[in-house]
Amino acid sequence: MALQGTVIRTIFQTATSFGTAFDTLCQLSGISPEEISDSENMVEWEKAALIWVPLLKLSGDPLIGLHVGMGVDKLLHGMVGFLIQSSKNLDQGLQLLCRYGHMASPMVEYRYTVNEVAILEMAQNKMWLMKHPEPARHANDFLFAATINTINTLLGKHIVPLRIELAYEMREISEYRKFFGCEVLFNKDTNRIILSKEVLSTPILTSDQSMFQLFSSIVADKQARLETNSTVENLKQVLFMQFKGRIPTIEEAASAMSMTPRNLQRKLLQEQTTFRDIAGEIRKEIAFQLMQNPAIKISEVSDILGYSDLTAFRKAFKSWTNSTPREMRQSFGGRGSAN
């Protein structure tokens, strides 16, 4: 997972209006200006996730993500951004966001459906939510506010959602209602922007069919190149991204990779490995990530990873690290309780 460098640059540049210097934010985040100067550069997911820590500390603002997002006129970067800007109308733009949004931010999964209303869902990666819940909240608030501003800029008019739903506890609801101009509900199962479907046909001001064809070709070619990775690497990405509190099954992984379980098994054998081996590697990586959050109990890590009991998890963990979960938790400076 990673995040497009220029998205971080936009966040830092917008945050300067809160009195924090751009260079200071780069230094405290461990990110050089060069890393975020090109839309083709991707910043490793954990560095990207933690940029909200210094922003929160320096600003003292419990809604820093929302407020920075409110200051962004248009959050579109790279070829995917150009493609969306040249699309015909909002409906087509949202379809493209869902199809190619992972190329800018694999940390977020976009889903878009239209029935009686239009619903844009933005689901953050489960690992991010579990390991860094507070930064994840600020990132989500930023994304929601910046998305609404981007829609307004693309359409050249102010769009008021029917409703906003957030998978977080309520915090200063008046600020959310003031910005979004609609009902805002908290503690929902996922994050959603709900729009009237009548607004979907609104044309995008920068629509250009010839440019749309050009950028469509470029983005599709880039996506195809990304998919030429080995089956093992693609599977690892799917297992990590589709982790929703448990490791996906081979059927779920194969479906996400647009192949049958049998074909997936065959391709993995050609690369001299198995689904079980790869799932084991991802389970190990997720265990290490979760163990670094002292708020997650060792017993909860065991349950999340699908072990039948805590003893089985301890045995597996010791085979990976030659230490017990409690010993590793203590080395991170967290509590050692397995309860």
Image (cartoon, grey):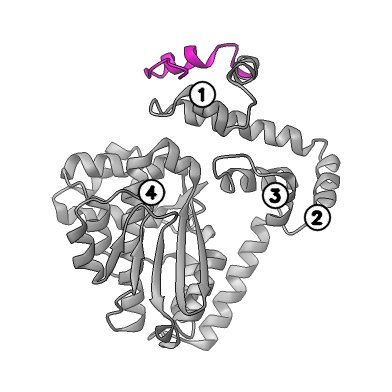
The residue under label 3 is which amino acid type?
Answer: Ala
Q: Position of residue 268 (x, y in %)?
A: 80, 42
Magenta part of the protein: which range?
320-339
- Residue at screen point 37% across, 17% down: 333
Whole-angstrom CA distance, mark 3 to mark 1, is 26 Å
Judged left or right of residue 23, residue 3 is right
Q: Residues within 10 Å of mark 2 (few under 14, many from 20)?
A: some
> Which residue matches tag 3?
253
Whole-angstrom CA distance, mark 1 to mark 2, is 34 Å
* Mark found first going from the N terminus, 4 or 2: 4
Quadrant containing the C terminus is top left
* Mark found first going from the N terminus, 1 or 2: 2
Whole-angstrom CA distance, mark 4 to mark 1, is 42 Å
Q: Position of residue 2 (x, y in %)?
A: 49, 48
Q: Nearer the viewer, mark 4 or mark 3?
A: 3
Q: Nearer the viewer, mark 3 or mark 1?
A: 1
Q: Is residue 74 visible?
A: no
In which quarter of the view is residue 313 placed?
A: top right
Which numbered circle lies on residue 34? 4
> Which residue matches tag 1?
299
The residue under label 1 is which amino acid type?
Answer: Ser
Q: Residues within 10 Å of mark 1 (few under 14, many from 20)?
A: some
Which numbered circle lies on residue 260? 2
Whole-angstrom CA distance, mark 3 to mark 2, is 9 Å
